Image: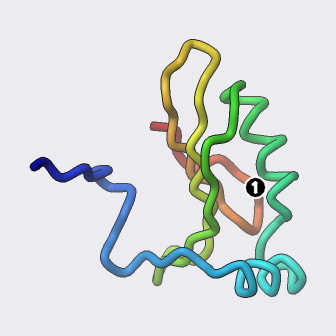
């Protein structure tokens, strides 16, 4: 049996926020709303959203991790700064 791992995308200290924590982060201005993040990501990686998570990582803060199915059929993982909406990385 193999193990599926995303090199560099997950860390032992990274943690997905619960829905309640995510709502609080958005309400307090620490994170942009998911719809705004998705709009920005689709401008760069057009396609269908497969999964999204708001993630906290010490020393990096909050970021969104989105899994997108591109029009070509390729799957992309996009990392976005939750506060600014700046796309940090596309893999």
Seen at 78% across and 46% down, the residue is 38
Comparing 24 with 62, the one in front is 24
Camera-side residue of 86 and 71: 71
Q: Secondary structure at mark 1?
A: loop
* Residue 14 vertical position relative to residue 43 in the rendered view, above or below: below
Image coordinates for residue 7, horizontal then vertical, percent = 28, 51
* Vertical comparison of 3 with 41: above or below: below
Image quarter of residue 25: bottom right
Residue positioned 71% across, 25% down in the render: 46
Q: Residue at x 69, y 32 (%)?
A: 48
Q: Residue at label 1? A: 85
Toward the front, the furthest residue is 1
* Residue 91 image point, x, y percent: 45, 37
**Drawn side of residue 59 relative to residue 78, left or right:** left
Specify whether 63 is left or right of 3: right
Residue 70, position in %: x, y? 60, 23
């Amino acid at each position: 049996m193999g193990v599926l791992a995303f090199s560099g995308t997950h860390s032992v200290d990274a943690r997905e926020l619960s829905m309640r924590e995510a709502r609080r982060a958005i309400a307090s201005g620490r994170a942009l709303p998911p719809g705004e993040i998705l709009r920005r990501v689709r401008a760069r990686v057009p396609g269908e959203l497969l999964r999204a998570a708001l993630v906290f990582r010490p020393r990096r803060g909050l970021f969104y991790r989105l899994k997108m199915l591109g029009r070509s059929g390729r799957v992309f993982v996009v990392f976005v700064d939750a506060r600014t909406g700046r796309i940090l990385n596309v893999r």
